[in-house]
Image (cartoon, rainbow, N blue to C red):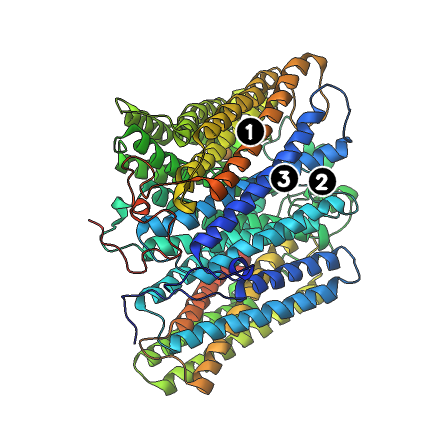
Amino acid sequence: MAHGPAKGITRWLFTTNHKDIGSMYLWFSFMMFFLGGIFALVIRAELFEPGLQIVEPEFFNQMTTLHGLIMVFGAVMPAFVGLANWMIPMMVGAPDMALPRMNNWSFWILPFAFAMLVSTLFMEGGAPNFGWTFYAPLSTTYAPPSVTFFIFAVHIMGASSIMGAINIIATILNMRAPGMTLMKMPLFVWTWLITAYLLIAVMPVLAGVVTMMLMDIHFGTSFFDAAGGGDPVLFQHVFWFFGHPEVYIMILPAFGIISAIIPTFARKPLFGYASMVYATASIAFLSFIVWAHHMFTVGIPLVGELFFMYATMLIAVPTGVKVFNWITTMFKGSMTFETPMLFSVAFVILFTIGGFSGLMLAIAPADFQYHDTYFVVAHFHYVLVPGAIFSITAAVYYWLPKWCGNMYNELMGKTHFWLAFIGLNLTFFPMHFVGLAGMPRRIPDYALQFADFNMISSCGAFLFGAAQVLFLFNVLRTITVGKKASDEVWENPEGLEWSVPSPAPYHTFSTPPEVR
Amino acid sequence: MSSDSTYYVPEQSKLPIFASLGLFLTVFGLANWLNGAENGPAILFVGFLVFAFVLWSWFNIVITENLQGLNSTQLKRSYVWGMGWFIFSEVMFFAAFFGALFYVRQLALPWLAGEGSHDTATETLLWPGFVAEWPLMQTPDMAANGENAKVFGPDHSMSFAEASSLWTWLPFWNTVVLLTSSITVHFAHTGLKNNNRKQFHLWLGITVFLGVVFLILQAEEYLHAYNDLGLTLSSGIYGTTFFMLTGFHGAHVTLGTFMLLVMFLRAILKGHFKHDDCFGFEAASWYWHFVDVVWLGLFLFVYILG
Ligand SMILES: [Cu+2]
């Protein structure tokens, strides 16, 4: 165990080391982030002006579909799993993940799954074109033949997620160092424990719904076919039973990251640790009973509309607790604004905006107006970009010195932040306005009165994309020629991960540390 | 032998990447096959062989490591957590299909027949004459086109007709077989705990046998449905839910029987499992109990209340 990594490519192919696997997850996610970003820029380029200029409407639909699928399953989720791989064993004082070989299996399924998914672009009939939510019958009766490959790609990436989640739960529950009681765990570990539970609960439901599609398409069943006694709305119920918890899968680990970074740069312990844990658990519980808020306009009974409306609004309570705690942590702190902190503060502000527009959408009668407009697009991008993406970026800047032993360039980091911050607000804030004015989503053309705001959005999108290239450059530069970082990196940060040298040795905590 | 001080972290392993390759080729071949490509079955076959071989080697290595005493009690706890959460994921998979069944029966079919839609009248416009019933024999399409149901029923369907015919009702016997097998696997476990190898082998063998009997009876049931009742996968939502729920359950029984068979062969041929070290067998038996519980749900909601 006292040895370093193997030489050459086999280090990565055959590894069982949580740090190697974490790095592979993060690099894979970074690549998918750029690929999904390119698809987004195709969309924004087409929407730069009204009319059809650059792509055919069919291809536009494939872009919206693949952009969503790749960002959700290829960029955000693997990034969080990568962070979990790197950080959880170090945070709980474990020598590695609980099941190291299965850990590598979870990762290596992903490149195959996404190669298969992306290859549908070159198939007859084109890639999936029915949106990332793949509503039936668009995704069954009227789907291109490549839908079969899409279904199996979802199956195996689901298997990867479930195995990854099982590994994380087993690590957290079984591998903590002596003295590391549950209520002493860092919040990143807590939020991931709850996220892993959500993953195991809902990824099988996603597998179930794509299996129903497969059977309807190839074996003549009638799950989603009213002519045979089924119901297309059934698809939406099963999908969103997965889909709503899925959005918390993409945000709970972010809560954990922000709860680690803000105390460090406010130089105060986190306010309300226990309430953070309970709030996370409540959000996870509520996430199972709100799914039909995505379906207010599909025609569900009035009691359903009311139940799902009020249940959804309830989520604002634990979320509010969290935002309150972050702000209270910063209150009267001796704050500095290094890059991770900038991203974290922006997270708190912008995620709250996304939360508020979510509350607007939760109001069933108002949703009849907002449904399927750009307001919805603005809402979930405010939750996912400054939410998930900013938290991942913050985490990379925060822990990169620990991972590679070198400090990133602060000026370049701050430039990245401001470009991304301005770019994202330019892109998504105007979408609120065009959405409220009635611009429908997923359409390659639009009425003339939306032209100005769309042009602003498109400029913002390219700015945001350019900022990420700077990010990539900064990361590469840090790893190769960055200045040496100290073992503590930051001023008195909390957590076991800072007690090991920078860069973290290949094997940490082969004998568990004592936690007081 | 086992100690709590060091957690065994395996060296580099070729298993994961080849397992991924095998899994990928399997689904890639299957997708090609379903889409009518000629090379589909061949890719599927190769992928499945690779996958099966990797899994075989993987279990082989894990068993060898345990026999070498590399597995601490802590590591064994990781396996226990792993199996437990895997079974939970399977529960959620079935939950999706049970949810579909409840939704269709309680909401979708009454709505298709016009209930609650006084102001939309979809049923008069789209499916005139459709009547919601369960088991659904005449689909909305057939009703609208004036076709008669091709499926016999409801007195001939798979659902429970009357108490007097209980003894000739196949699902009842299937339930008896499967419930008994859950008890016999428990007897096998008790035998192992008491170091009574003979009892262990005997009851485990009986359990495998009962699993096979269940599968044969289930095949009988399917043949009856297809040949005599006209009930098929494509005969509307009743056939859909019936075959998908019982079919996935049957697939899980097949896997569970295979797992128990492997444990049986390991026990009698290699003398594996000790009274205090028998995770492989225990995992298979938990899986078997899970399959049994799913059947109870099926028996109640698909057959008795069907
Ligand atoms: Cu939702």
Query: Which residue is under mark 2?
Result: B129
Q: Which chain does the numbered disc 3 sit on?
A: A
Q: Residue at x 62, y 47 (%)?
A: B133
Q: Residue at x 37, y 41 (%)?
A: A485
- Cβ of mark 3 under 8 Å from ligand 1: the answer is no
Q: Residue at x 79, y 46 (%)?
A: A124
Q: Earlier in the sequence, mark 3 or mark 1?
A: 3
User: Are the numbered discs 3 and 1 placed on the same chain, yes or no?
Assistant: yes
Query: Which residue is under mark 1?
Result: A467
Give percent across and percent down for residue A247: 49, 37
Q: Which quadrant: the C terminus of chain B?
A: bottom right
> Does residue A417 appear in the picture of this structure?
yes
The residue type indicated by label 1 comes to Ala
Give percent across and percent down for residue A154: 60, 49
Considering every residue shown, the one lying at the far left of the view is A516
User: Are the numbered discs 1 and 2 placed on the same chain, yes or no?
Assistant: no
Of marks 1 and 2, the one in the foreground: 1
Q: Which chain does the numbered disc 2 sit on?
A: B
Q: Secondary structure at mark 3?
A: helix
- Crowding at mark 1 (Cα within 10 Å: few <14, some 14-19, many 20+): many
Circles 3, 1 touching at the beta carbon (< 8 Å): no
The residue type indicated by label 2 comes to Gly
Give percent across and percent down for residue A243: 53, 40
Give the CA distance from mark 3 to mark 2. 52 Å
Q: Secondary structure at mark 2?
A: loop
Query: Which residue is under mark 3?
Result: A35
Of marks 3 and 1, the one in the foreground: 1
